[in-house]
């Protein structure tokens, strides 16, 4: 029997989902929670096989509750069931440790299937979520211009961001003025910018400067 904790702040949703799951021969809803904070407490108390977690709730949202549960109980299997596909909902939930992410608009049968598959260790994602994750992975794998900078060129860029002149950079780094000019020329070319000001703007834009 698959023991399930149902988390949702809407009573009608809990009633509807619970009613369907309770008639499944292999499922049992052993608890319900109406907000994220209560979800954490009941998850750690009841240790269900699967936690069906809503995203937008009072006191603590689904991503925060997921992170709190996983921190204390890393084996927890959490399925996000929500109406939202926004990036600021999807990524935090999956990064927090949720295994699956499905929509409330899914029919009850799909939710039940997602529970069974997640219990087996499989990840169930809405097609739109899969697309988002693939895009994020590809973006993460793309090299940025600043990835081509050497350690010394990066160091020179940081000094430029502080408003240092070439001579001041040379003095600070104990290198020749000519060497500084070479580093500046090289980093401008690698960052594909025209001058020092654009290089500094690039550095701040890409969080290269503390």
Image (spheres, helix red, strand yellow):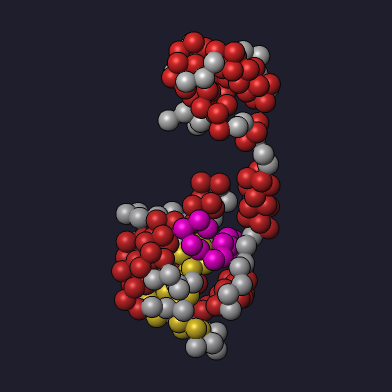
Rendered position, 170 above or below 72: above
Residue 22 placed where, x, y %? 49, 82
Residue 27 placed where, x, y %? 51, 84
Describe residue 79's horizontal placement relative to residue 188 as left or right: left
Describe residue 174's horizontal placement relative to residue 73 as left or right: right
User: Image point 54% across, 87% down: which residue?
Assistant: 26
Please report the bounds of the magenta region as a residue range: 94-106
Residue sitting nearer the eye, 94 or 125: 94
User: Image point 31% across, 76% down: which residue?
Assistant: 45
Regarding residue 129, the answer to whether it shows in the image is yes
Magenta segment: does it hold 98? yes
User: Image point 52% across, 12% down: which residue?
Assistant: 166
Rendered position, 37 above or below 183: below
User: Image point 42% across, 62% down: which residue?
Assistant: 66
Quadrant in the picture for residue 36: bottom left
Residue 121 placed where, x, y %? 58, 75
Rendered position, 119 above or below 205: below
Residue sitting nearer the eye, 97 or 102: 97
Magenta segment: does it hold 155? no
Residue sitting nearer the eye, 209 or 28: 209
Count of numbered labels shown in the rendering: 0
Quadrant in the picture for residue 182: top right
Residue 105 placed where, x, y %? 59, 61
Residue sitting nearer the eye, 63 or 194: 194
Regarding residue 204, the answer to whether it shows in the image is no
Q: Quadrant of the C terminus?
A: top left
Rendered position, 50 above or below 89: below
């Amino acid at each position: 029997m698959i023991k399930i904790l149902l988390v949702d702040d809407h009573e009608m949703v809990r009633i509807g989902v619970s009613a369907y799951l309770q008639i499944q021969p292999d499922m049992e809803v052993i608890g319900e929670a109406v907000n994220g904070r209560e979800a954490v407490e009941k998850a750690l108390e009841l240790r269900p096989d699967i936690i069906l977690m809503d995203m937008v709730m009072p006191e603590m949202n689904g991503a925060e509750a997921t992170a709190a549960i996983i921190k204390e109980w890393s084996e927890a299997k959490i399925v996000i069931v929500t109406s939202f596909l926004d990036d600021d909902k999807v990524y935090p939930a999956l990064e927090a440790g949720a295994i699956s992410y499905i929509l409330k608009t899914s029919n009850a049968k799909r939710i039940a299937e997602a529970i069974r598959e997640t219990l087996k260790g499989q990840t169930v994602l809405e097609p739109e979520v899969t697309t988002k994750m693939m895009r994020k992975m590809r973006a993460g794998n793309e090299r940025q211009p600043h990835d081509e900078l050497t350690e010394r060129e990066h160091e020179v860029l940081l000094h430029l961001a502080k408003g240092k002149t070439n001579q001041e950079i040379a003095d600070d780094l104990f290198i020749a003025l000519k060497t500084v000019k070479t580093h500046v020329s090289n980093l401008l070319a690698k960052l594909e910018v025209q001058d020092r000001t654009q290089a500094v703007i690039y550095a701040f834009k890409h969080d290269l400067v503390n």
